[in-house]
Amino acid sequence: MSEEVQVRRARRSDLPAIAALVRRATHSRIQMDEDEVMEWLFSKGLLVAFQGDSLAGVAAWQAENLVSVTDVFHVSPARLRAKIGRRLLETIEAEANILMCEANVVVLPVWTSQAVRTFFRGQGYEPQELKDLHRIWREVLGEFATGESDLMVKRLREKMVMVPV
């Protein structure tokens, strides 16, 4: 029986489960504690995805200067990536569109698996180098994109917004 996926904003009561999911999804490469997850809760749009009663995905994003940056994205178990991941991205992209964002940029650790990268490509994301992006996007991404990360970009608008909104 296929259970429906529910995506919602994270709550404080979700913090222990989010920390455990990140550890599980990254095979303990990222060791999160509840204080670090709380920082995400207060500084970003933190989304959780449930299949039935089980937490299966988490994503954190923020918008600045018409660019949405998703720098947290984890799904576990991996077999649910297509279903859970797609719903998380749809939610982020819909909210980013409301904010008139031109693109959503996913920041991935360099050690991200090929399967995850393939998933993002299937959702319309393309690998990009920071140096090849528009100057304003580079400024926004400067604090997120380190030598330890790769970027996947999906344009949400054909034309850049050239006047204040």
Image: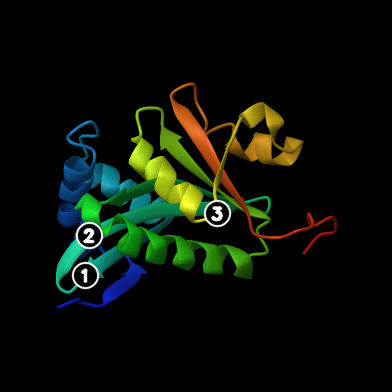
Q: Hey, what amino acid is under mark 2?
A: Ala
- Mark 1, residues whose alpha carbon is within 10 Å: few (<14), some, or many (≥20)? some
Labelled disc at residue 56: 2
Q: Residue at x 22, y 44 (%)?
A: 25
- Distance of label 1 from label 2 (alpha carbons): 6 Å
Q: Are marks 1 and 2 in contact (CB under 8 Å)?
A: yes
Q: Of all residues shown, which one is farthest toward the right?
A: 163
- Secondary structure of residue under mark 1: strand
Where is residue 35 drawn, in percent x and y?
24, 44
The residue under label 3 is: 124
Establish if 130 lies above or below 11: above
The residue under label 1 is: 51
Q: Earlier in the sequence, mark 1 or mark 2?
A: 1
Q: Earlier in the sequence, mark 3 or mark 2?
A: 2
Q: Hey, what amino acid is under mark 1?
A: Gln
Locate residue 28: give its quadrant: top left
Establish if 133 lies above or below 47: above
72 relative to 53 in the view: left or right: right
Which of the two residues, 4 or 38, is positioned nearer the viewer here? 4
Where is residue 106 drawn, in percent x and y?
49, 45
Where is residue 32 drawn, in percent x and y?
22, 39
Q: Residue at x 53, y 37 (%)?
A: 151
Where is residue 111 drawn, in percent x and y?
35, 28
- Secondary structure of residue under mark 3: loop
- Secondary structure of residue under mark 2: strand
- Distance of label 3 from label 2 (alpha carbons): 22 Å
Establish if 130 lies above or below 159: above
